[in-house]
Amino acid sequence: MFQKIQRRLLLSYLLVFASILGIFAIAVRIFFTRSLTHQLINELTALGQGAAANAEFDKGKMIIERDLPGQNLEARHQGLQWFDTQGHLVKQQGNTFLKIP
């Protein structure tokens, strides 16, 4: 007699539970991706500012004064490359570089 109502309640409870679980999973994913993206942007900004501080222009040519202080690019599997306005490589540091033309 109550089998039909019992099944309907079970299905509705499962549907509500699955919806809440799905919404929670999506919220956690969005939070962590935004957090990781923000962290990556901050690290790249700091690296770029340090690299820009070491570069100078002298008679139209870029001169890199020295290696970045306090940056161990090899241990972090990173690489940094400087290019002139024509796209030619001026200097590189580290050991990990993209092979994109």
Image (cartoon, helix red, strand yellow):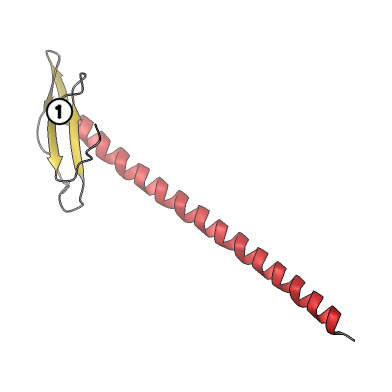
Vertical comparison of 82 with 61: above or below: below
Q: Quadrant of residue 95?
A: top left
Q: Vertical placement of 6 versus 28: above or below? A: below
- Kind of residue at badge 1: Leu
Q: Residue at x 85, y 79 (%)?
A: 5
Give coordinates of residue 58: x percent, y percent.
12, 17
Q: Quadrant of the N terminus?
A: bottom right
> Extreme bottom residue here?
1
In the image, is 9 to the left or to the right of 29? right
**Residue at the spot of label 1:** 89
- In the picture, residue 42 is in which quadrant? top left
x, y percentage for residue 51?
A: 20, 34
Depth check, front residue: 15 or 71: 15
The answer to whether residue 38 is above or below residue 100 is below
Q: Farthest right residue?
A: 1
Residue 65 placement, left or right of 82:
left
